[in-house]
Image (cartoon, rainbow, N blue to C red):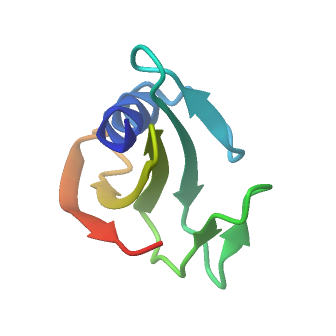
Amino acid sequence: AARSAVDDGILRVIRRSYSLSEYQVFPSGGLFATALICEDSVGGSYGSSGITCGGLSVGKYEIIAVGKALAKRRQLVAVLEVDPLTRLVKIESIVEKPL
């Protein structure tokens, strides 16, 4: 579920169709994930469910997704670099962080 939310966030960044608030993703069945897209967040920003964005440099995005499937929870953090002229998106990293 968390990976689906990261993939959805990448598509939202490419299309420029995102808000800087949390959103829900329901991939299938009883799975769901909460995600937050952060853009150039210096000093951090916070979502309503306690998801925190770290400090990013200009032109970088961070997608933080917390997925839940039955009793398992998983947090993935993706860092993207976006060229301001061409909107070319490069994925710098996707890592799992402990909750």
Image point (35%, 37%), residue name: 10
Horizontal side of 49 relative to 40 (left or right) equals right
In the image, 69 versus 50, the foreground residue is: 69
**Residue 96 rendering spot, x and y as whole percentages:** 28, 66
Location of residue 62 by image quarter:
bottom left
Q: Say if 93 sits above or below 19 in the image.
A: below
Horizontal side of 28 relative to 7 (left or right) equals right
Image point (58%, 50%), residue name: 36
User: Which quadrant, please, contains the N terminus?
Assistant: top left
Q: Say if 66 sits above or below 70 in the image.
A: below
**Residue 60 rendering spot, x and y as whole percentages:** 40, 63
Number of callouts in the render?
Answer: 0
In the image, 36 versus 4, the foreground residue is: 4
Residue 19 visible in the shown view: yes
Q: Say if 35 sits above or below 11 in the image.
A: below
Location of residue 9 by image quarter:
top left
**Residue 47 rendering spot, x and y as whole percentages:** 73, 58
Horizontal side of 57 relative to 80 (left or right) equals right
**Residue 8 rendering spot, x and y as whole percentages:** 39, 29
Image point (73%, 67%), residue name: 46
Horizontal side of 92 relative to 87 (left or right) equals left
Residue 18 visible in the shown view: no
Give the farthest residue toward the front. 71
Give the farthest residue toward the right. 48
